[in-house]
Image (spheres, helix red, strand yellow):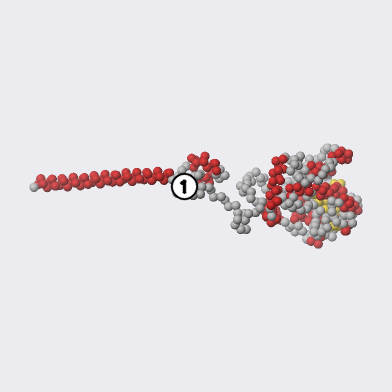
């Protein structure tokens, strides 16, 4: 009886041990199966491009630089961390859009999809080669003329007569061909640009545009104030070579100045504002919409400014391109200044060249020549002259500057910060 009990206990013990061993084996098989499944899943995930991909960015440098080199390394790394690979989409299985979403090209807030003619160029412009903007303006003078002045016979030999020319793309004597063609290409943008867009672009390109006319009639007066300041009050307090003032207010000597092609009179308004009652001005400009508007002088008295319109006096047309008007204006000035002439002359001539902006320099030849001739005819010895010009690279314009270089002690090409961008 005791032996049977011992055999039953041993059998029960062996059964429990076999069950335990079987359970351990099953757990081991399940564990190994789970591990193999996890490894398989990991392998599958490694093969699929997804947002959780941890692929090294360094391995993709070669492929990224081909089509997306315009993006910096930080942007490319961020895209790589999100699972982006060149040639694959961002979907779980590489599907979807394969190109980077382009930046918006919408300009302004005047309607989605509005396209402004003339502004369809590339937006990625590198401005790093531009000089640092500064409010300090520097005046550069031409070297003093030390060569002998050619006689009249030699100057006449330089004169070349020909047919009227209306193209400028071959004027490469004083500038390189690449520079000229680049300039003309940039100017051609304005051909298709609307007037409103042109004004917007000009205002945003120059922060000094917001100054406008200040306390004066128009922006021309502020431009003249800027020039006078930069040139040490040369036009409101002229001095001789020794630094002595040429006008003495206490002795009753007036500042005589001229203003041609300058309606409605902003230049003159500034001079009279600075000099008050110690100045006398003479002006000539076209009659009509471009005439002087003395009644609109806000900052200075207009009683000391006398308009003159050339041949015929008040009945003239004021056209400076007519030789008889230049002669009449010169005689009028000399008669009213005791034959001594003007201390300074200002010229601001210009006309609309809409649709022909590229050849503005050619179209302005005659006007520029007549303004220079008027200055040389009316200024006294030691007088000053300021004239608005445009491009100066054709032989004709360079020749005019050369004549001024011979006639004046110093010559400077200067652009104020208040000048409108062209």
Q: Residue at x 18, y 45 (%)?
A: 14
Q: Is residue 26 left or right of residue 242?
A: left
Q: Is residue 43 left or right of residue 410?
A: left
Q: Is residue 311 left or right of residue 59?
A: right
Rendering quarter of residue 155: top right
Q: Position of residue 107 (x, y in %)?
A: 62, 54
Q: Position of residue 48 (x, y in %)?
A: 44, 45
* Element at label 1: loop
329 up-or-down from 410: above or below = below
Q: Residues within 10 Å of mark 1 (few under 14, many from 20)?
A: some
Residue 401 at least partly seen? no
Q: How many numbered discs sit on the rendered protein? A: 1
Q: Position of residue 395 (x, y in %)?
A: 79, 42
Rendering quarter of residue 241: top right
In the image, farthest residue toward the front: 163
Camera-nearest residue between 279 and 166: 166
Q: Residue at x 75, y 40 (%)?
A: 172
Q: Residue at x 53, y 44 (%)?
A: 73
Q: Residue at x 46, y 43 (%)?
A: 55
Residue 132 at least partly seen? yes
Instruction: Name the residue carrying label 1.
Output: 94
In the image, farthest residue toward the top: 147
In the image, farthest residue toward the left: 1
Q: Position of residue 23 (x, y in %)?
A: 25, 46
């Amino acid at each position: 009886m005791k032996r049977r009990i011992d055999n039953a206990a041993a059998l029960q013990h062996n059964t429990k041990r076999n069950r335990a061993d079987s359970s351990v084996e099953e757990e081991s098989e399940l564990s190994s199966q789970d591990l193999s499944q996890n490894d398989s899943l990991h392998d599958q995930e490694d093969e699929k491009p997804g947002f959780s991909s941890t692929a090294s960015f360094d391995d993709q440098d070669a492929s990224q630089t081909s089509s997306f080199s315009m993006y910096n390394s930080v942007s490319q790394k961020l895209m790589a961390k999100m699972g982006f690979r060149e040639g694959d989409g961002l979907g779980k299985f590489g599907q979807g859009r394969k190109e980077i979403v382009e930046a918006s090209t919408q300009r302004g807030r005047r309607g989605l999809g509005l396209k402004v003619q003339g502004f369809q160029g590339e937006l990625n412009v590198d401005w790093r080669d531009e000089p640092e903007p500064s409010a300090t303006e520097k005046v550069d003078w031409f070297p003093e003329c030390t060569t002998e002045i050619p006689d009249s016979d030699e100057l006449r030999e330089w004169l070349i007569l020909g047919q009227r020319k209306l193209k400028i793309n071959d004027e490469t004597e004083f500038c390189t061909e690449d520079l000229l063609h680049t300039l003309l290409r940039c100017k051609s943008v304005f051909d298709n640009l609307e007037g409103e867009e042109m004004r917007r672009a000009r205002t945003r390109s120059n922060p000094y545009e917001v100054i406008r006319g200040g306390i004066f009639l128009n922006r021309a007066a502020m431009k003249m104030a800027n020039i006078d300041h930069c040139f040490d009050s040369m036009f409101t307090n002229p001095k001789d070579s020794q630094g002595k003032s040429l006008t003495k207010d206490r002795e009753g000597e007036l500042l005589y100045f001229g203003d041609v092609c300058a309606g409605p009179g902003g230049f003159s308004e500034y001079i009279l504002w600075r000099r008050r009652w110690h100045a006398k001005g003479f002006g000539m400009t076209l009659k009509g919409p471009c005439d002087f508007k003395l009644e609109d002088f806000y900052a200075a008295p207009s009683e000391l400014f006398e308009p003159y319109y050339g041949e015929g006096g008040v009945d003239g047309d004021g056209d400076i391109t007519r030789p008889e008007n230049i002669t009449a204006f010169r005689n009028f000035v000399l008669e009213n200044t005791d034959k001594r002439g003007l201390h300074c002359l200002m010229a601001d001539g210009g006309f609309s060249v809409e649709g022909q902006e590229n050849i503005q320099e050619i179209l302005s030849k005659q006007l520029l020549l007549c303004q220079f001739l008027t200055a040389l005819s009316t200024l006294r010895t030691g007088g000053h002259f300021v004239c608005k010009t445009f491009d100066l690279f054709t032989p004709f314009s360079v020749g005019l500057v050369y004549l001024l270089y011979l006639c004046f002690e110093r010559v400077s090409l200067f652009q104020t910060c208040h000048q409108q961008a062209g």
